[in-house]
Image: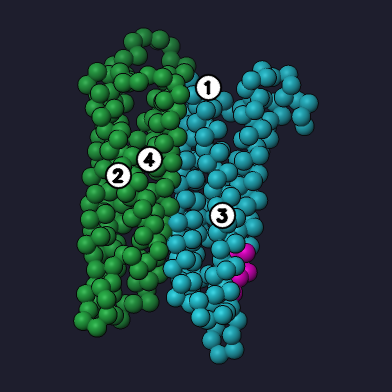
Chain colours: A cyan, B green
Amino acid sequence: MSQFPQYEEPKASKLPLITLVSRVVTLASLVVSVVILKTNNIKSGGYRTFTYKEIYSYKYAMFAMVIGFAYTLSQIPFAVYYLKTGKRLINHHKLLQCDFYGDKLLSYLLATAIGAAFGVTADLKKTSDSIEKLDNYFQIAYISVAFLLVGFLSSVVSSIASSFAISKRS
Amino acid sequence: MSQFPQYEEPKASKLPLITLVSRVVTLASLVVSVVILKTNNIKSGGYRTFTYKEIYSYKYAMFAMVIGFAYTLSQIPFAVYYLKTGKRLINHHKLLQCDFYGDKLLSYLLATAIGAAFGVTADLKKTSDSIEKLDNYFQIAYISVAFLLVGFLSSVVSSIASSFAISKRS
């Protein structure tokens, strides 16, 4: 894959790579985070199973991550094309602006999701330190939040890359 | 893309006004939100007073808002100068980049704060609907979050304005 961009102007050639890598990292982190959050549960005899659905903040984080996954997946083909050819598949100013605002929106959505998931984990874990099963549940929830954090940071990189794409174009 | 490379100035003149207004709105909203969160408490005879300090997510939101207030306040003089003269006080590319990253960072910080404060309010309110005093406490917390939301949105406007400032400059 690395042979292709050599034909392009060498200076600009980092942007396509950064774009693709950040999208792939976002995608992978969100998948891992969703899987951990979804499979994490407490089974106890008397009560029904305790899952992320019991907590609004986790439900919101799940919603944000699914949206983030779908959006990022839809951007991957464009990022691959950009890397292979060094050109945008659709090099239209309005569409670059869509990318710019879409990436911004996604990274803010993930930022609020991190705040919600991390905050509620910290506060609920505090009140349940004495209950081993719950404490363990929130410990695993922290791991999910950690992957969400990685996904968020790489979405910020995408967002910065797409704002450079706009300023290069204009 | 524009056929007529005519005078840039009249078009560009909205940017200083948008910059100043968004900074002032951010500042005002954060002040209101902080005051509401700080003065909201439950006094009860037997127990000690319940304040935002009992909840990690609120403490984090408070931290983020104080940082946001200080940063935004420090930017106001520059925004006023920009509006009055139509020029940047310091028109240096590296410093415009500082603005760009600073504004981005602030808006992400406020986004995580909203997630945390809103999420924990929703989840804790659910468990305390039957306790009138706590329910009332969280009702007021929602108002604080609403102002934080306004502050966040206007910080996003500042952030977009400063990314246009970079692309205009380069």
Same chain check for tags 2 and 1: no
User: Is the magenta region chiefly helix, strand or loop?
Assistant: helix
Residue A130, image x and y in percent? 51, 80
Residue under numbered circle 4:
B156
Residue at point 34%, 77% (across, down): B128
The answer to which of marks 2 and 4 sits earlier in the sequence is 2
In the figure, is residue A110 to the left or right of B152? Answer: right
Visible in this render: residue B4?
yes
> Gap in Å between the C-alphas at discs 3 and 1?
30 Å
Quarter of the image where one finds residue B166: top left
Q: Amino acid at mark 4?
A: Val
Between tags 2 and 4, which lies in front? 2
Three-letter code, disc 1: Lys
Q: Is residue A31 left or right of residue B10?
A: right
Mark 1 vs mark 4: same chain?
no
Crowding at dot 4, Cα within 10 Å, few <14 / some 14-19 / many 20+, comes out as many
Quickly name the residue at label 2: B69
Residue designated by label 1: A168
Alpha carbons under labels 1 and 4: distance apart: 22 Å
Which of the chains bears the disc numbered 4?
Answer: B
- Examine the image and state in which quarter residue A158 appears: top right
Q: Which residues are magenta?
A: A36-41
Nearest the eye: B107 or B10? B107
Q: Residue at x 65, y 44 (%)?
A: A24
* Of labels 2 and 3, the one closer to you: 2
Which secondary structure lies at badge 2? helix
Q: Tag count in the figure? A: 4
What label does residue A148 carry, if any?
Answer: 3
Q: Which mark is residue A35?
A: none
Chain of the residue on which disc 1 is drawn: A
